Image (spheres, grey):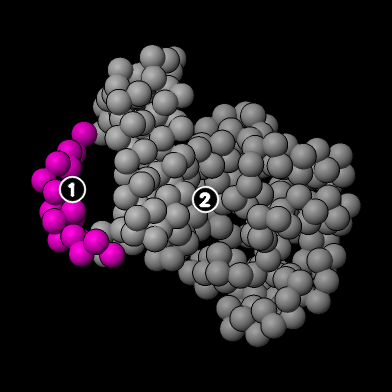
Amino acid sequence: MERTIALIGFGEAGSTFAKAAGWEALALAFDINPARRAVMEEAGVVACATAECALSDADIVLCLVTADSALPVAQDYAALLKPGAVWCDMNSVAPDTKRDAARAVEAAGGRYVDVAVLAPVNPARMNVPLLLSGEHAGQAEAMLRAAGFTKTRVVGDDIGRASAIKMIRSIMVKGIEALTAEMMLAATRADVVDEVLSSLDASEKSDSWFVRAEYNVERMTTHGLRRAAEMEESAKTLIGLGIDPLMTSGTVKRQREQAGKAIDFKLERTEVA
């Protein structure tokens, strides 16, 4: 790693990457929380008191702030970039937010790249899967690999494509977590945890998501009304146990809405590194 790297935001992701990669003095870091300075020093990076200090000579920037700060940070700090600097927006935000941030960075002479982080940074560290999109994604991929990231993949030239993959994927990943919580609250109160989990284990299939997605959507199209009625009774069960059926009520609505309607989607397998 010979290029100067700037870390904007030095929370869990920034500190994890810096320590795992061993960038030390090649990396300059800035965080609006002064308490993070001690963590920067522990990681061996240059702790900057201002964003200008971190950005003025950086060839590549890793923006790792909170989701609500991603756009304001891009807009406020774009003018501090060295001409041609690559701004890797690694924040978990909507495609439209990334496109707005890209306009600010590009207008200031920077090169914006949409980066989606597809897994928790711990314990993956530098092996965390990264998807990149945008006109400068290829250049950014080479720089990120030189910086120590091992699992990078360019998914297109359009800003927002990488984040769309992550955000839509999160509907399932985080949705399953929320559904699991709703199920376990109910199973615990009804004292049927072992039976419910054993039943799920018995019916679990190992099909790929290409198969499962097609099957699940077909089930809704064919049996959505009946399933919606069943889920209404599940919602009543939750209410009877004193649990607000937040996820289950949404399932009722989606099942009923999709009944008789096919979703026209194209299944095209993508090799994932």
Q: Nearer the viewer, residue 218 or 260?
A: 260
Q: Residue at x 30, y 35 (%)?
A: 230
Quarter where residue 207 is shown: top left
Up the image or down, 148 lies above or below 131; here it is: below
Disc 1 target residue: 200
- Across and down, in percent, residue 150 comes to 44, 52
**Is disc 2 surrounded by few (<14), some (14 to 19) or many (20+) residues within 10 Å?**
many
Main SS type for the magenta part?
Answer: helix
Q: Is residue 51 left or right of residue 185?
A: right
Classify mark 2: helix, strand or loop. strand
Q: How many badges with numbers are in the image?
A: 2
Q: Is residue 102 visible?
A: no
Q: Residue at x 45, y 55 (%)?
A: 244
**Is disc 1 surrounded by few (<14), some (14 to 19) or many (20+) residues within 10 Å?**
few
Q: Amino acid at mark 2?
A: Val
Comes first in the chain, label 1 or label 2: 2
Q: Residue at x 86, y 39 (%)?
A: 107
- Per the rendered image, the range of residues in magenta is 189-207
- For residue 5: magenta? no
Furthest toward the front, the residue is 240
Disc 2 target residue: 117
